[in-house]
Amino acid sequence: MTTTKAFANHAADKPMVPFTFERREPGAHDVAIDIEFCGICHSDIHTARGEWGPTTYPCVPGHEIVGKVRSVGAQVKRFKAGQTVGVGCMVDSCQQCASCKEGLEQYCESGFTGTYGAPVKYEGGYTKGGYSTHIVVNEKFVLNVPENLNLAAVAPLLCAGITTYSPLRHVGVKKGDRVAILGLGGLGHMGVKLAASFGAEVSVLSHSPGKREDAKRLGAHQFILTSEPANIEKYQGYFDYILDTVSAKHDLGQALSLLKRDGTLMMVGASDQPLDLSVFSLIMERRKIVGSLIGGIAETQEMLDHCGRHGIVSDIELIAAEKINQAYERTVKSDVKYRFVIDCKTL
Ligand code: NAP
Ligand code: ZN
């Protein structure tokens, strides 16, 4: 067992506080990792605060993990001590079902094991995530991290990066396509960088006037303030694709009206409130709404390699662990530029 320092909250309405627990010893197929950096995803906040349903406490969130291999189990071939690696939102899946066999572990028919909050037979009965100094993960769920990139800024690629890469790739975004990213937060800013790297004409749809300059700097060609009716009027029927990353209830009808005939709205933002939909916004122009959940392990490696080749990382604010609660407050207010990352040395 390895004594592991962490931050956890003990109830939905309680703050993140220091917490210590024991990680299991690595088994034959496991990799033991000393965590260096962990991003703060809005999903951590939804979960810690019980917004998506009951949460098991103490809750140690964190699924954007980068660190160094401390040791490996006897059967591990792909990793060795000292190597830089990443862990994302999954730490296990059945490996037998059709989805797992296709490399789509996120859609495992038995349900994948999430990096935090999932029932397991070790470490007190449920998984604990990356707001911690150490983690033990089956090698199949450990990623190689390009060494040429700033490692703190790589951490958010493990969720925000793959969650935007996967749907953009799945629909085949290519040079010249008109793509809008709705919501410029952690996911949104990665969506802008990745869509631009595929050659798309990228626009940002935002409810925050102060993000105009950043949107351009991140690679967007247009910034469209969703609260300005004239702007919305100008872009009616304009986009091939909209990637919706908004974390709260918002107007789907407005987003759909901006799509061309046969355009696609891709939902990744996971509001805890149901969203209203008038079917006419789909019927009249044969538009589509699709959802997408993170990405499989092979695709996550493909995304990391793509980012390594193109020098793509997240824009981050690196914080000490004692600032996690402030970071949560700022994220909820859409005041994050554009991902908080915890320096895990400070845990
Ligand atoms: P984030 O950094 O907080 O960004 C969300 C953005 O949504 C904000 O920056 C803001 O952008 C916009 N927004 C927030 N509240 C809004 C409101 N009331 N009305 C309109 N726009 C609003 O969050 P994130 O980490 O990117 O995560 C985004 C969502 O994706 C969360 O719900 C998260 O749980 C979910 N998620 C899903 C997956 C998946 O696999 N599908 C994976 C990871 C995360 P502007 O200021 O530009 O308007
Ligand atoms: Zn996430």
Image (cartoon, rainbow, N blue to C red):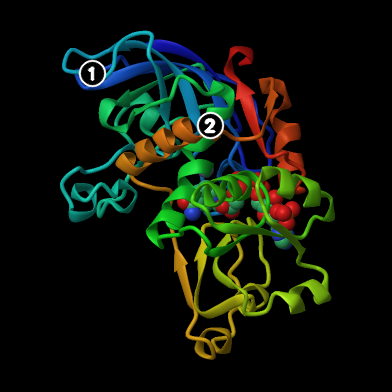
Mark seen at residue 27: 1
Query: SS for tag 1?
Result: loop
Q: CA distance from mark 2 to mark 1?
A: 35 Å
Q: Is mark 1 within 8 Å of ligand 2?
A: no
Q: Which residue is mark 2?
A: 311
What x and y, as percent, mark residue 337?
A: 72, 38
Assign the N terminus to one quadrant of the image. Answer: top left
Res 68 quadrant in image: top left
Res 180 quadrant in image: bottom right
Residue depicted at x 84% and y 50%: 210
Q: Say if 287 sits above or below 240 in the image.
A: below
- Left or right of 193? Residue 126 is left
- Amino acid at circle 1: Gly
Residue depicted at x 45% and y 68%: 290
- Amino acid at circle 2: Gly
Res 119 quadrant in image: top left
In terms of depth relative to the viewer, which is nearer, 198 or 44? Answer: 198
Name the N-terminal-most of marks 2 and 1: 1
